[in-house]
Image (cartoon, rainbow, N blue to C red):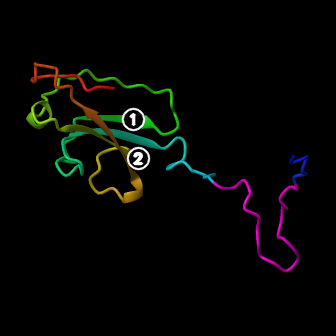
Amino acid sequence: MGGNKAVTPAPSGPASPGTTETPANTNTLGKQLADPIWPNGTPMSMLLFLSTSETSDDINLSDPLITWDDLTFGDWKQEREEDLMLEVPHSVSHGNGSWWMDIKLVKNGGSIGDKKLDEVASYRKRAFYSRNNTDDRACPIPT
């Protein structure tokens, strides 16, 4: 029947002197290094916007829903809270549309205004509206 067969480990370097072949099993596949966008201690602001557009083309960058100033990049213990009542857009409550939260972190605080591309970080969160809610005047954003 098959018997025992010895398994030879893959070589750890080139196959032989003068060749450039590298073994497939180098254990480096899938590893990615990431650096923080800014150094810890960088002052910043967080601006929140609501959008019903997949491309965010309906938000006014000069008029955020919420602005939180005096935040510090790297101080992960900071907390902010806001209590809001929001008008649910008709396209979301009756048209099965999506509602998005666009989050902008602004390096050195303030508004987006004349900031350079590397001074603004963006994140987007999709929130679906439940069509079971019959009161379309106000609804909390799902988490």
Residue 49 at x, y percent in the picture: 24, 39
Q: Residue furthest bottom?
A: 18
Residue 21 at x, y percent in the picture: 76, 72
Indicate whether residue 49 is drawn in magenta: no
In the image, the segment drawn in magenta is 8-29
Along the line of sight, the residue nearer the viewer: 68 or 28: 28
Structural distance between the alpha carbons of marks 1 and 2: 9 Å
Mark 1 secondary-structure assignment: strand
**Residue linked to disc 2:** 108
Residue at 65% in and 55% down: 29
Q: As displayed, is residue 36 above or below residue 10?
A: above
**Residue linked to disc 1:** 70
Residue type indicated by callout 2: Asn
Residue at 85% in and 62% down: 11
Residue at 27% in and 33% down: 127
Q: Main secondary structure of the magenta part?
A: loop
Q: How many marks?
A: 2
Along the line of sight, the residue nearer the viewer: 134 or 119: 134
Mark 2 secondary-structure assignment: loop
Quadrant that contains the C terminus:
top left
Labels 1 and 2: the sequence-earlier one: 1
Is 63 displayed left or right of 18 in the figure?
A: left
Along the line of sight, the residue nearer the viewer: 35 or 1: 1
Indicate whether residue 20 is drawn in magenta: yes
Residue 34 at x, y percent in the picture: 57, 50
Mark 1 neighbour density, 10 Å: few (under 14) some (14–19) many (20 or more): few
Residue type indicated by callout 1: Asp
